[in-house]
Image: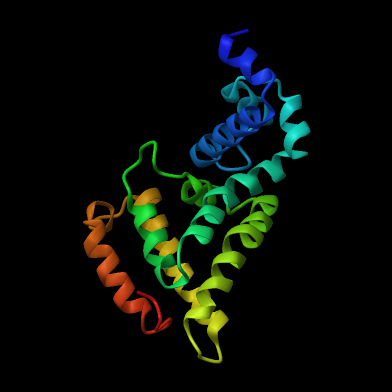
Amino acid sequence: MTTEQHARKRDAAATREALLDAGSELFAERGFDRTTVRDIAKLAGVNQALLFRYFGSKEALFEETMARGGREQLASTPPERLLETALRSMLTPDGTSRHKSMEAFLRSTGSDSAAIAIRRRLGDEYAKTLATLTDADNAELRADLALSWVLGIGLVRDITGKEPLASADPDEICELVLTGIRSLLERTD
C-alpha cells in the first residue's frame, strides 16, 4: 500500500474525491457503459467496495461527476453569464483545469441510466436558470434550444473534430454563438 493510499484510507473526503476524479476521467474517456467499477477503483487507488460505500452505485457516481462541475458553475456564475462561462469552459484545451463533463456527457448519452442522470443533473438545472433570461411565454423551450446549441458545439468540436470548428478561436466562437443566443435569451451577456 502506498503512502498516499494509506493516508486516504483515513480520509473519507480524499477517497470520495479520488473516486470522483477517477470516474470523471474514465467516463469522459470511455462513456458510462464501458467504464467499470473495478477500473474506477483501480485508478482511484482504492478498493471497489468504497465506491459503493460513498456513492451506492456506478450510476450515482456518474450523476455526481456530471453535477460536480455544473453545480460549481451554477453557484458561482450569474445567470446572464452562464452560457458564455459554460461555452468557454468547453472550448478550453484539454488540461488539468478542464472538467470532463462534456466528454462524459457526449460519450454516455446512449445509456439509459446515464441519460436519466444527464437530464436530471445537467439539463434541468441549466435550463431552469437559462429560462430566467427571457420574459417570453416559451422560456423553457428557448433555454433548451440555447443549451442544445452549446452541447452540439461540444459534440462537433470535441468528438467529431470537424473543421473549421475544431480549431476555431474560442473568442470568435463565443462572439458568434452568444450573438445568436441573445435572440432567444435577450438578457444573456
| Residue 13 screen position, x and y as percent | 65, 32
| Residue 157 screen position, x and y as percent | 34, 54
181 vs 75, nearest the viewer: 75
Compared across the picture, whether 123 is left or right of 113 comes to left
24 to 175, vertically: above or below: above
- The image's colour scheme reads rainbow
| Residue 71 screen position, x and y as percent | 56, 55
Compared across the picture, whether 52 is left or right of 164 comes to right
Q: Residue at x 62, y 32 (%)?
A: 19
Q: Residue at x 58, y 9 (%)?
A: 2
Q: How many marks?
A: 0
Where is the C terminus found, in terms of image quarters?
bottom left
106 vs 14, nearest the viewer: 14
Compared across the picture, whether 81 is left or right of 5 comes to left
| Residue 152 screen position, x and y as percent | 42, 63
Outermost residue, bottom side: 137
180 vs 153, nearest the viewer: 180
Q: Residue at x 62, y 16 (%)?
A: 7
Outermost residue, top side: 1
Compared across the picture, whether 87 is left or right of 139 comes to left
Where is the N terminus found, in terms of image quarters?
top right
